[in-house]
């Protein structure tokens, strides 16, 4: 059985490949929401640029997983077909938010993001190793590689703005 800790990543061991895809989609949506929130609350343009780039990758990952889910779950595909024929229009603009984060909070968020990217890479590497569907295996491996790039990009930001040393990291 799989469940989600409030405000966190999914937990547990899903049995079906479709459950693993959904679990990955939850992880991607959590990352998208986190990065979006960070950007909305930061006045640091360099940091926001990195967060936005990573957030766009996470959105791409969500789409990759949903495409596979539609392929392997007939009910999900039927729901997709149904909503393709439904017309919905945007009736009001998105709410705007004024940023108000300070420097130290930004560093905490970067470290939290690093933790999330590392956890995701571990999960996706495990899935890529265990899953027998070649296309699903390849997508998990590819996205895990992206997550590892995110770790390095975030680490670069951390080292740039955090005045404390990290054992000689550059």
Image: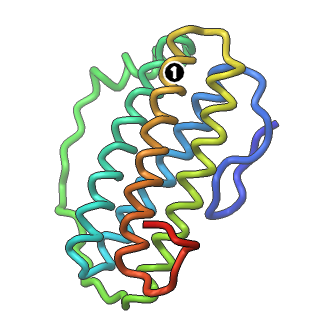
Residue 78 higher or lower than 5, as above or below:
above
Q: Position of residue 139 (x, y in %)?
A: 48, 23
Residue 10 higher or lower than 77, as above or below:
below
Residue 60 higher or lower than 38, as above or below:
above
Front in this rendered view, residue 21 or 140: 140
Mark 1 falls on what kind of element?
helix
Pick out the residue farthest to the right: 1
Q: Position of residue 30 (x, y in %)?
A: 51, 54
**Residue at image coords 45%, 89%:** 104
Give the quadrant of residue 60: top left
Q: Position of residue 55 (x, y in %)?
A: 34, 52
Q: Which residue is mark 1?
A: 69
Q: Position of residue 69 (x, y in %)?
A: 51, 21
Q: Residues within 10 Å of mark 1 (few under 14, many from 20)?
A: many
For this view, does 91 lie left or right of residue 123?
A: left
For this view, does 92 lie left or right of residue 54?
A: left
């Amino acid at each position: 059985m799989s469940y989600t800790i409030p405000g966190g990543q999914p937990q547990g061991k899903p049995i079906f490949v479709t459950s693993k895809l959904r679990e990955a989609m939850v992880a991607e949506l959590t990352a998208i929401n986190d990065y979006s929130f960070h950007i909305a609350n930061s006045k640091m343009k360099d940091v926001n640029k990195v967060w936005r780039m990573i957030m766009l990758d996470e959105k791409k990952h969500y789409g990759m997983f949903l495409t596979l889910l539609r392929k392997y779950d007939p009910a999900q595909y039927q729901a997709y077909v149904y909503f393709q024929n439904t017309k919905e229009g945007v009736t009001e603009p998105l709410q705007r938010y004024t940023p108000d984060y300070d420097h130290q909070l930004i560093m905490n968020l970067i470290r939290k993001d690093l933790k999330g990217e590392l956890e995701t890479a571990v999960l996706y590497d495990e899935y890529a190793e265990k899953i027998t569907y070649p296309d699903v295996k390849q997508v998990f491996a590819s996205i895990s590689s992206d997550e590892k790039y995110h770790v390095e990009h975030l680490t670069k930001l951390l080292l740039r703005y955090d005045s404390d040393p990290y054992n000689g990291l550059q």
